[in-house]
Image (spheres, rainbow, N blue to C red):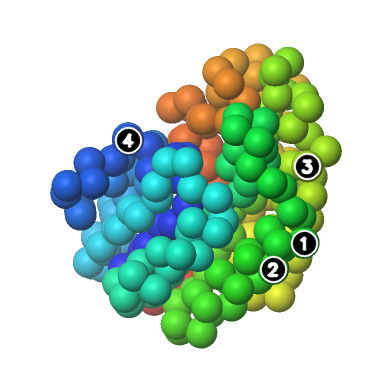
């Protein structure tokens, strides 16, 4: 069974791009470590194709190449950079275009025959990112809309992190509100495994 991960830096997690088999040091590698022992009779292949800095349009631009992996399950986690790039370098943020792009990506994954799991992007409550929230909620609407139409499973990570950070300091999950700590990466991996298991024969 082949599981393909596509998205931005949260998926990339400093993977060695000269090594196609490298999974990085984030939730993808943690998921692989946790899932394999649960199904010792299944030969898994995990493919990390996340690229740091990617917006959903960048994910779309790589999608044909990524889908050539012929994965059984595709996990998509993207969207924060569509907002972050606006504040970093003034890149235009067009919520309608973002929504249309998420729809096209999700539809193409489904057309490939793979099961699609969409993990919601997340933004933790840190002071210098509060200004992101209005546009970010538009991204969440776009992601949820695409998931409703095309995804086989959906994980509301923004909601999950908002909940857990009420009882534990936000810094336990992210220093900058965007990139997950090891603890947060474990939480992402655990929630994805719950969604993957029903699709494992």
What residue is disc 4 on? 14
Identify the secondary structure beneath mark 1. helix
User: Pointer 2: what residue?
Assistant: 100
x then y, percent, for residue 172 = 56, 18
Marks 1,2: beta carbons within 8 A: yes
The label on residue 96 is: 1
Residue 31 visible? The answer is no
User: Of the residues under marks 4 and 1, which one precedes in the sequence?
Assistant: 4
In the image, residue 48 sits, relative to residue 97, either above or below, namely above
Lower position in the chain sequence, tag 2 or tag 3: 2
Spatial distance from mark 1 to mark 2, Cα to Cα?
6 Å
Q: Nearer the viewer, mark 3 or mark 4?
A: 3
**Circle 4/circle 2 CB separation < 8 Å:** no
Name the spot of residue 33 as percent of width and height, x first.
30, 45
Report the disc number at residue 135: 3
Q: Nearer the viewer, mark 4 or mark 2?
A: 2
Whether tag 1 and tag 3 are in contact, CB under 8 A, the answer is no
Mark 4–mark 2 Cα distance, whole angstroms, equals 29 Å
């Amino acid at each position: 069974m082949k599981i393909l991960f596509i998205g931005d830096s949260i998926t990339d997690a400093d993977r060695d791009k000269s090594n196609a088999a490298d999974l990085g040091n984030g939730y993808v590698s943690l998921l692989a470590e946790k899932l394999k022992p649960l199904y010792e009779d299944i030969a898994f292949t995990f493919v990390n194709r996340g690229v740091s800095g990617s917006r959903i349009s960048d994910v779309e631009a790589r999608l044909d190449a990524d889908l050539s992996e012929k994965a059984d399950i595709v996990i998509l986690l993207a969207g924060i950079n569509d907002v972050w790039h606006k504040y970093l370098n003034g890149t235009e943020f067009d919520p309608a275009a973002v929504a249309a792009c998420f729809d096209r990506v999700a539809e193409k994954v489904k057309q490939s025959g793979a099961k699609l799991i969409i993990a919601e992007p997340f933004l933790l409550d840190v002071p210098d990112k509060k200004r992101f929230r209005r546009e970010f909620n538009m991204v969440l609407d776009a992601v949820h809309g695409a998931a409703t139409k095309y995804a086989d499973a959906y994980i509301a990570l923004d909601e999950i992190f908002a909940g857990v950070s009420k009882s534990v300091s936000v810094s336990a999950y992210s220093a900058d509100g965007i990139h997950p700590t090891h603890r947060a990466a474990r939480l992402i991996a655990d929630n994805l495994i719950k969604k993957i298991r029903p699709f494992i024969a």
